[in-house]
Image (cartoon, rainbow, N blue to C red):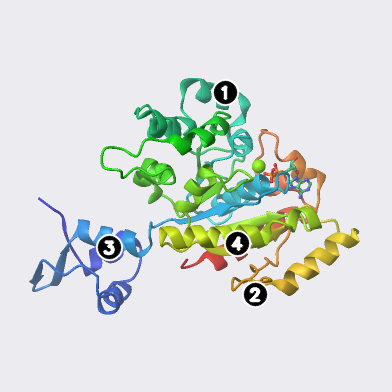
Amino acid sequence: MDDLVGIAEIAKMFDVSSAAVTNWRSRSEDFPKPVAILKSGPVFQAEHVKKWYRRRNKMAATVISSINLKGGVAKTTTTVGLAQALSGVFNKRVLVIDLDPQTNATTMLIGEEKWFALNQEGYTLATLFEDAIDDSSNFNLLKTLQKSVGNVNEVKSVDLLPSSLNLIDLQDRLITMPAGKYQTRNPVNILRRGIKDIVDDYDYVLIDCPPNLGYITLNGLRISDGYIIPTIPDVMSTYGIPQIVTRVAEFSGEIEDEIIPIGIVATKVRGQAAIHTRTMNKMHNDAGKPMGGSKLLYPLVFDAYFSESAQIAEAAEYQEYSTLRQKWGYQGQYNSLVEFTEEFMRLTEGV
Ligand SMILES: Nc1ncnc2c1ncn2[C@@H]1O[C@H](COP(=O)(O)OP(=O)(O)O)[C@@H](O)[C@H]1O
Ligand SMILES: [Mg+2]
C-alpha cells in the first residue's frame, strides 16, 4: 500500500514547520491534491508530495559547480575547502563530484593509494561515462561513492564520487555516443541519470569541473543550480570570465533550466601585488553591471577571499589533521574559509 501522510508528517519529512507546508499548499497550484480529507485533516500520497518537493527544488540538494577555464587558480582547493567547512563547521551533508581528469579533488580527499585501487577496479566516474558510450552497465554507484572522506577528524559528512585520468579520452568519445533506441540519450545527461538516486541525500553537492566547457563540464552544469568562479585576481586568470558567463547562460537556455552565476571568489591573493589590488577593484566595480556588448551581467564578487599562503598549499597533501583550523592555518586562512563558506550559504539559499 502507498504511504499516506498528513500535513504534520509532510512537515517532518522535509524538516519544516506545518505552517510552511500549509503555505506551499496555498501558494503552489501544482501541490498534490489530497487523496482524502479525514477528520484530522487532508492526507496525501507521500510519493506525490516527495516528487513535488524534488521538482520544486529541482533536486533537494543545492548543486554548485566550480569553474574556471584556467588551471592553477585554486578551483580544487576552494571546492574541497568549502566542502570540508560546510561539513565540519556547519554540519551539512556534502557530496563532492570530481569531474576533473586531473583527479586533484579525489587525491586530496582519499589519497593516491586509495584512488589507485578504485581506479583499477573501475570504481570512478569514468565508468559511468564509458557505459554511456559503450552501451554497457558496469558503473556501480554504491561502490564508487566514497563515504566520509577527508583527513580531518572534525569533518564527518563529506562523500566523494572520484574521478579518473581516463575522463580525458572519454570527453572526446562522448561526441559519438549512441542516442539509444528512442533517441533519448544525451551526452550531457549522463551524470544526471547516473546519480539521481543519491543527490537528495545531501544538502550540498559541489562539482569540481575541468578547466574547459566540454561535455564533461556540461554534465556537471546540467545538474547545477549555480556555479562559482574561483580566480587569481590577475589579467590572465580573469580574462575568460565573461566567456564562461555567456556560454553557461546559452547552455542554461538550451536546457531550459536556470544555472545561476553565484559569484567570483579571489584566490591566492597577494596584498603587495599592485595587479592583484587593481584586478580586485575592477572586479568589484564591474560586478552586477552589463558585460561589454552583452545583456548579461558581470557576476558578483565574494567579499571573502583567500590570500596566498604556504599553509593552504600544503593542505593539499593527504595527511591527518584533527581540526580544519589546524589544516588551514592560524594566520587568518581558516577565518577566510569560514567567512567564504558563510557567504556561500547565504548566496546559494533558495537557488
Ligand atoms: N591560497 C593559496 N595560497 C597558496 N597556494 C595555493 C592557494 N590556494 C591554492 N594553492 C595552490 O595552488 C595550486 C593550484 O591550486 P588548485 O586548487 O589545484 O587549482 P586548480 O584546481 O584551479 O587547478 C596548488 O598547488 C594549490 O596547493
Ligand atoms: Mg583542480
Please tell me which of labels 2 and 3 falls first in the chain. Answer: 3
Q: Is mark 3 on a helix, strand or loop?
A: helix
Q: Is residue 198 above or below residue 229?
A: above
Task: Name the residue located 59 percent from the left edge and 52 percent from the top edge.
Answer: 66
Please tell me which of labels 4 and 3 falls first in the chain. Answer: 3
Q: Which amino acid does label 3 sit on?
A: Trp
Task: Tell me the mark number nearer the camera, choosing from 2 and 3.
Answer: 2
Q: In the image shown, does 303 or 86 lie closer to the viewer?
A: 303
Per the model, the C-alpha gap separating discs 4 and 2 is 11 Å
Q: Where is residue 26 in the image (x, y as percent from the top left)?
A: 26, 79
Residue where numbered disc 3 is placed: 52
Task: Tell me the mark number nearer the camera, choosing from 4 and 1.
Answer: 4
Q: What element carries label 4?
A: helix
Q: What residue type is labelled 1?
A: Phe
Q: Where is residue 313 in the image (x, y as percent from the top left)?
A: 76, 42
Please identify the quarter of the rendering in which residue 58 is found.
Answer: bottom left
Residue where numbered disc 1 is placed: 116
Q: In the image shown, does 206 or 171 lie closer to the viewer?
A: 171
Task: Name the residue located 11 percent from the left edge and 66 percent from the top edge.
Answer: 35
Q: Is residue 121 above or below residue 222?
A: above
**Residue 156 visible, this angle:** no
User: Does 338 sit left or right of 132 as displayed?
Assistant: right
Task: Tell me the mark number nearer the camera, choosing from 4 and 3.
Answer: 4
Residue where numbered disc 2 is placed: 290
Q: Is mark 1 on a helix, strand or loop?
A: helix
Per the model, the C-alpha gap separating discs 1 and 3 is 41 Å
User: Does 13 sit left or right of 304 as displayed?
Assistant: left
Q: In the image shown, does 134 or 348 lie closer to the viewer?
A: 134
- Which labelled disc corresponds to residue 245? 4
